[in-house]
Amino acid sequence: MATPSNSEKILSSKSQKSLTPLPSLYQNQISSSPESEGNDFGQILAIIQRRILLITSIAFAVASGMTWQALRKPVVYQSGFQLLVEPVKSSDKLAGLTTNSYGGKVKETSLDYETQIQILKSPQLINRIIENGIFQQYPGLTYGAIVSRLSIFRQGETKILTVRYQDSNPDRVKFVLDQLAVGYLRYSLQEQQTNLRQGLQFVDEQLPELINRVDTLQARLETFRQQYNFIDPKTQAQKLSAQAESLSAEKFAIQKQLVEVQTRYSILQQEEGAIAALNASANYQQLIGQIRQIETLIALESTQYRSNSPPIQNLLNQRQNLMPLLRQEVQQVLGSQVAAVTNELLLLQVRLNAISQAEAQVNRQLEQMPTLDRQYTDLQRDLTIATNSLNRFLEKRESLQIEGAQTEVPWQVLSPPARPGAPASNLINQIMTGIFGGLAAGIAFAFLLERFDNVFYSDEDIKDKTKLPILGVIPHNKKLKAWEQIQSEQQMQGEQFNADVGELNEAEIPFVLGYNFLPFLEAFRTLCTNIGFLSSDTPIKSFTISSPSQSDGKSTVAVHFAQAAAAMGNRVLLVDANLRLPEVHEQFNLTNEFGLSNLINTDVDADEVIQKVPRFENLFVLTAGQIPPDPTKLLSSNKMRSLMKVFCANYDWVIYDTPPCTDVVDSKILAPHTDGLLMVVRLKKTDKNLLNQALESLKLSRHNVLGVVVNSAKPQQNLSGYYAASPQKEAWTKAALEPATETHTPETTGNG
């Protein structure tokens, strides 16, 4: 590969800063730091610079309109006076009487200034002032004429109203203000007296009804307390709750005793219980003892005597006599025990019934307490509201009586009206206001248009939005079409033009296109160098070139990039993969009878279809060929992938010019089989939404986006000494360009 010349090593500083040697789309999407205030200020200046014509037009129109209006407006004089409409402090001697008999102070009422200003400007009051004085001096002044020139406003948070009036006659201004001051003072005194009378009348009318309502509610509350025999329902509920708890505990104790007595009664009814009761009886035990003694004696005598002997018969008789006594004792003991238990059961049952009745009564009272409490609360609330209303009316009547007893001070004129000496309007101020207002309106409208303008204006804007490296910035050049026309004409004439874009001697370019064309050529050399720096391990040998839309200049970039790469000693193949709207053959003035589509569909050898550009030693072009019915099918075929491998093996760089990636999927089909995709974005043309859509689509399909080429950038105004031409060379350049400029219309950098 040829070693680059010294001119090829010269890189523009802007492109060097844009270079970021990261090959992957996801590696390029590094989170940027927040924009500094300097960047924001720079963006604002850029917007103003772009819209300077619009801003100046709006500013001139607004300033002219306000100046014309100011010149047409008659001279106006203005004057005014100030009114103190509320006392600064209360009167000294009677101020203490405003404390009412209920322990509180009468609240001082504050003036509603907005309402008061509307009253002062009302037709009723102004017409009265006109009739009393103004009409005799100036019959032509009507309510509408005065109000349109009258302004009344409050002076901050003070108790002062400022009244201003303006007119073309200074004497009339002074006279109208004098009449307004007199009329407003008269109104204030009449208004205060009228308000006092109406207030006292209203209070006196409402007091009897309020007193009657308070008395009625107090009587109802007293009857309620007497009926239910309590003062406070909450206290009564607490007492009833305590009684209920006490009765419940007592009831439980009696029920326990009742169970115990019932158990004792059951035991007495059984044999074991009866024996236990008899054992506790002394008489029963004594009789049992006597019977046992007699039985013992009978047993002893039986050993000596026969059973019918007198001693034994005597003992038997004794025992027989004791048995009735024993039976009688048994009945007496058991009967007394059962009777005692029965009486105890009856007594406990009676107590239990009494406690149950008392508990039920207490519970019924507790159930009524919520209703009674609500009734009591309603009565208490109504009484409180009625009492408060009565107190307020009594306080108000007392306040009005005291206010009426005081010496009423009407409004005061703090600064009397004066005759205006100089006009109120200043022509210079109005003109300056129009200029600054127009500038502000123009800037605001410019920023509004900028908000809805959806195109890019700078490479920095593209870099911020895409987070991709800017690999090249192609300046806008009006001589591009002339350059292509010169090359085509010389090729058609059969001349061997060896000075191509890269090989042309820079000393000869000014005689053809001028020195402004040199930065355009150098931009493509810089782009070639930047792409070569993207990957140091595996050099990039093939890539696709695409754009968001059809008019972004991707084909022009591809053509001139291929020329620059070939001029730098690389063996370059430019493949026109746009099988829908091919353009590469037109820019090189090549035939398009056989091309990529024919190469895929047939078994023709690639070398037979690839064309060598006559004017370039290392540049080869594979045109699109005949447009197929289904380009996507051809580009996604295995034959196409095989051809791409062959191209990559035979050439240093293989460049694929593809259709816009937002319209069709052709570029997305080819890009995965190359080293990446180069996105061309044209300033002032590419839609931001289309670019975002294209990048999002590539991101989802995990395509490797190498970077962005900014097309149609603004040329640098100050060229370095490397590009500067002497006056003599500039004269030669002008002479050489005159035929070209007459023949060719200046155009932008491509539309492919």
Image (cartoon, rainbow, N blue to C red):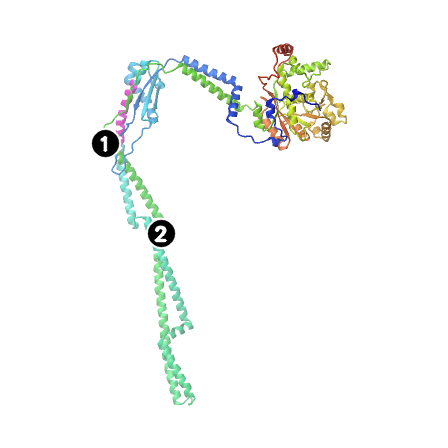
Q: Which mark is residue 72?
A: none
Task: Quickly name the residue at label 1.
Answer: 94
Q: Residue at x 70, y 14 (%)?
A: 490
- Seen in the picture, residue 349 relative to 22 is either above or below; the reply is below
Residue closest to the eye, 473 or 419: 473
Which one is earlier in the sequence, the residue at label 1 or at label 2? 1
Q: Quadrant of the C terminus?
A: top right
Give the quadrant of residue 288: bottom left
Kind of element beneath mark 2: helix
Please give left or right for residue 197 compared with residue 550 in the image. Answer: left
Q: Position of residue 712 (x, y in %)?
A: 60, 20
Q: Position of residue 597 (x, y in %)?
A: 72, 25
Residue closest to the eye, 543 or 354: 543
Give the quadrant of residue 397: top left
Total numbered circles: 2
Q: Is residue 184 magenta?
A: yes
Kind of element beneath mark 1: loop
Report whether residue 204 is seen.
no
Q: Main secondary structure of the magenta part?
A: helix
Q: Is residue 680 magenta?
A: no
Q: CA distance from mark 1 to mark 2?
A: 56 Å
Q: Quadrant of the N terminus?
A: top right
* Residue neighbourhood size for the residue with mark 2, other residues' Cα within 10 Å, grouped as few (<14), some (14–19), many (≥20): some
Residue closest to the eye, 635 or 714: 714
For badge 2, the amino acid type reads: Leu
- Magenta segment: 178-201
Task: Quickly name the residue at label 2.
Answer: 366
Report whether residue 521 is seen.
yes
For badge 1, the amino acid type reads: Leu
Q: Residue at x 27, y 32 (%)?
A: 202
Mark 1 in CB contact with mark 2 (< 8 angstroms): no
Please tell me whether mark 1 or mark 2 is closer to you in this view: 1
